[in-house]
Image: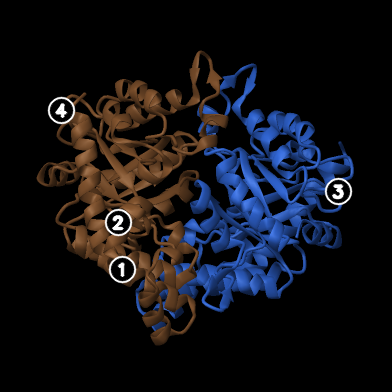
Chain colours: A blue, B brown
Amino acid sequence: MINKLIANIKKTGAPIVVGLDPMLNYIPKQIQENAYKEFGETLEGAAEAIWQFNKGIVDATYDLIPAVKPQIAMYEQFGLPGLAAYKRTIDYCKEKNLVVIGDIKRGDIGSTSAAYATAHLGKIQIGSKTYAPFDEDFATVNPYLGTDGVKPFVDVCKEEKKGIFVLVKTSNPSSGEFQDRIAEGRPVYEWVGEKVAEWGADFMGDGYSYVGAVVGATYPEMGKVLRELMPKTFILVPGYGAQGGKGADLVHFFNKDGLGAIVNSSRGIIAAYKQEKYAEFGEANYADASRQAVKDMVQDISEALENR
Amino acid sequence: MINKLIANIKKTGAPIVVGLDPMLNYIPKQIQENAYKEFGETLEGAAEAIWQFNKGIVDATYDLIPAVKPQIAMYEQFGLPGLAAYKRTIDYCKEKNLVVIGDIKRGDIGSTSAAYATAHLGKIQIGSKTYAPFDEDFATVNPYLGTDGVKPFVDVCKEEKKGIFVLVKTSNPSSGEFQDRIAEGRPVYEWVGEKVAEWGADFMGDGYSYVGAVVGATYPEMGKVLRELMPKTFILVPGYGAQGGKGADLVHFFNKDGLGAIVNSSRGIIAAYKQEKYAEFGEANYADASRQAVKDMVQDISEALENR
């Protein structure tokens, strides 16, 4: 699946991923009203609105992008109907040949991590039948519990030829509280980065490992160090756009081959129509605004990479 | 809710929580067969088997215990039907006046953590209506992302009078890889423990904070240090029984008032009938075996506390 991700990036020339993290207040009133008319002001109604909103964005952008990253929390907050919309979004994006990175940030120990891995990347046996419950292509994983917590994901990925992105240095302001603590001469995030490289060393695609890392665009200097520490690790980079990261901040996340990183934008793309820059599109044409925002993001990053 | 947890512990005299972490191979064949007969060998069939299994254990133990801790991963691996069984289990346990600790180990940043908090502890507004999606009483939270990741849970808890348990030192063998790194003179888990005490300082019930911690029974010496570092923090202690923790290991997790800790056992209780010790009950009477295992666990811990 890492090979497919890279093939998709090469095909589109866009090392980006669109974060499908819908909030109700991003969704045009008309879409919400139609959904509530059919399902009432219920969890089902909200889930339908989310799904229609997502579909509009995917239809308007799928030819320009290699991958999407739905954030499961945004669906989980609408309970079971929300999670049904998550699954529907995954399936639809896969139909459109997009790589789906489930941003689930799960992590536990032993058999429990194995259960999460099964849920999102693997298959479960029930009697004589087998099912793939959520069936994303990649998932994000939290490393706080150590190898016990991550290994079960890697094991399932090896069976399914799927991958993970392990949190190393997150994009948020307080990520340094624990991740930046200097432990035995180097910050905790470097210890984690080193483990990520180790976990992925014997599980390689063509050039990059199936075990990737998450490093925030908001910390470019740390990105540079981590890029060198984990040369074969694909880096998923959140924090571009709404969180403050710019194209120029991103160049050190990429290797000299122009690969090695994929940059996420969520709000900046899916709620583009709310920005002054894209206001001319209007609420009804929100998906066209998203398409333009994708083009602008690709251009920003391409220019930064050319000028480095 | 921390007050209710303590009241339930005092009423039952049992500082324990039963981990409702069903695996298909724990579930008696007859229950599975009945479920498959009705729903086929499907995710729905497996979910029905889990629910019937849980109900049997809850019915056989609810008068002896203060709380249950369903591990969501074990349900998530059965997709949407599995998560419906999770929700059904929560609702049933609450009917039985048990405190429900959702072992979800979620953690993200800002609005995403807020969405998880809404999903599991809070309420979501849809038009003019309000819904509580999963509605556990407590949830476990991963601290790797720092205050940004935890604060949104605390905010929702303040509104709902609910609580969280933050992972500090986990029970698994490799938890030390990052948690034990000595950073600026002390291990990372102590830095996390100190933050947990800080996050909970202004959110107190009668004697204990709504912000608790997770510290594994398998690390009793660290538990002793953390107990002193976080005197007002209730500690959820996994790792008893199947993972190797014994009653005598647990005494330092408790304060002198005999409170301050609640010890989890999952496999040791719910799959008790598979142990030689309880084999006489037989598969059909699995729930009675669980009841006896609860009694034995309470006695083991009580004796250890009396003899300290």
Q: Secondary structure at mark 3?
A: loop
Q: Are marks 2 and 4 on the same chain?
A: yes
Can you identify the residue that label 2 sits on? B278
Most foreground residue, A231 or A57:
A231
Which numbered disc flags the more N-terminal residue, 2 or 4?
A: 4
Can you identify the residue that label 4 sits on? B257
Q: Position of residue A259 (x, y in %)?
A: 83, 47
Residue at mark 2 to residue at mark 1: CA–CA distance: 28 Å
Q: Are marks 2 and 1 on the same chain?
A: yes
Q: What chain letter is assigned to the residue under label 3?
A: A
Residue at mark 4 to residue at mark 1: CA–CA distance: 35 Å
Please tell me whether residue B266 is drawn above or below residue B60 in the rendered image.
Answer: above
Q: Secondary structure at mark 1?
A: helix
Q: Secondary structure at mark 2?
A: helix
Residue at mark 3 to residue at mark 2: CA–CA distance: 53 Å
Query: What's the amino acid at mark 1?
Result: Arg
Residue at mark 4 to residue at mark 3: CA–CA distance: 59 Å
Q: What chain letter is assigned to the residue under label 4?
A: B
Mark 2 or 1: the one toward you: 2
Image-based side of B1 in relation to A49, left or right: left
Q: What chain letter is assigned to the residue under label 1?
A: B
Q: Quadrant of residue A182?
A: top right
Can you identify the residue that label 1 sits on? B88
Q: Are marks 4 and 1 on the same chain?
A: yes
Residue at mark 2 to residue at mark 4: CA–CA distance: 33 Å
Query: What's the amino acid at mark 2?
Result: Tyr
- Residue A207 numbered tag: 3
Q: Quadrant of the C terminus of chain B?
A: top left
